[in-house]
Image (cartoon, rainbow, N blue to C red):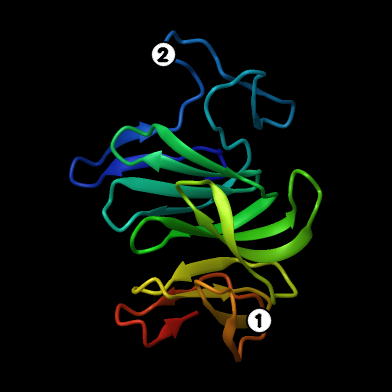
């Protein structure tokens, strides 16, 4: 959401289960709000915070975790039951899309712009190892911002949508497998069919 928050909802109860919070267990505020209304982590803040608009949320296949991407340096993995942050992947400026691999061991991100260290300024698809919090594969080939990414049902491929193009990649090697053209503008959302034989964009 543009309010920078991630929320979990119980559909049957029509009620909020948890929301990403900015206070510790003693009630002390962990973040501040700047002049533009953005939430900024205070010095020594022990939790990960999204402090700009959250663009993407997705469940892991077993439903135990949620991954979120935003217009800030963090991709955050949350405990789906409690809302606790278990892992933060930090090397981004803007993440329009993030998704788990079917086995939950990897996360793919649409990483756009420069990272915090300034050692790259590209529009990339990155595959992360959740356990080590490191990039294990970088997929280069889109000229414009990448808006949507997804793993295939068997986890062997990744699909990405960006600058009028749809690209399929080998999820292990990062090799580009094929490019699908036909759109006349940005590809904002993309998904595999359950059998992995088709892609919708």
Residue 192 is drawn in which quadrant? bottom left
Residue 140, given in percent of the width and then of the height, sits at: 68, 72
Give the numbered dot on residue 25.
2
Q: Earlier in the sequence, mark 2 or mark 1?
A: 2
Residue at image point 51% right, 23% down: 22
**Disc 2 packing (10 Å; few <14; some 14–19; many ≥20):** few
Q: Secondary structure at mark 2?
A: loop
Residue 89, given in percent of the width and then of the height, sits at: 56, 45
Q: Which residue is mark 1?
A: 164
Residue at image point 65% right, 58% down: 111
Residue 1, given in percent of the width and then of the height, sits at: 52, 45
Q: Please state which of residues 36 and 148 is positioned toward the viewer in this rendering.
A: 148
Q: Secondary structure at mark 1?
A: loop
Residue at image point 43% right, 8% down: 26
Residue at image point 45% right, 32% down: 20
Q: CA distance from mark 2 to mark 1?
A: 47 Å
**Disc 1 packing (10 Å; few <14; some 14–19; many ≥20):** some
């Amino acid at each position: 959401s543009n309010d920078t928050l991630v929320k979990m909802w119980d559909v049957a109860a029509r009620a909020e289960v948890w929301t990403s919070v900015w206070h510790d267990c003693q009630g002390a505020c962990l973040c501040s709000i700047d002049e533009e209304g953005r939430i900024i982590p205070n010095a020594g803040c022990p939790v990960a915070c999204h402090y700009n608009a959250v663009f993407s949320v997705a469940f892991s296949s077993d439903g135990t975790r949620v991954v979120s991407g935003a217009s800030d340096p963090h991709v955050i993995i949350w405990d789906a039951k409690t809302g606790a942050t278990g892992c933060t992947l930090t090397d981004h400026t803007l993440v329009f899309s993030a998704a788990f691999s079917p086995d939950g061991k990897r996360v793919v991100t649409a990483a756009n712009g420069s990272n915090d260290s300034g050692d790259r300024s590209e529009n990339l698809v990155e595959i992360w190892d959740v356990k080590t919090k490191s990039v294990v594969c970088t997929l280069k080939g889109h000229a414009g911002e990448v808006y949507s990414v997804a793993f295939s049902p068997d986890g062997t491929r990744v699909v990405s949508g960006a600058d009028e193009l749809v690209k399929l990649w080998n999820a292990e090697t990062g090799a580009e497998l094929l490019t699908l053209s036909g759109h006349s503008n940005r590809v904002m959302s993309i998904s595999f069919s359950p059998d992995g034989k088709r892609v919708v964009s």
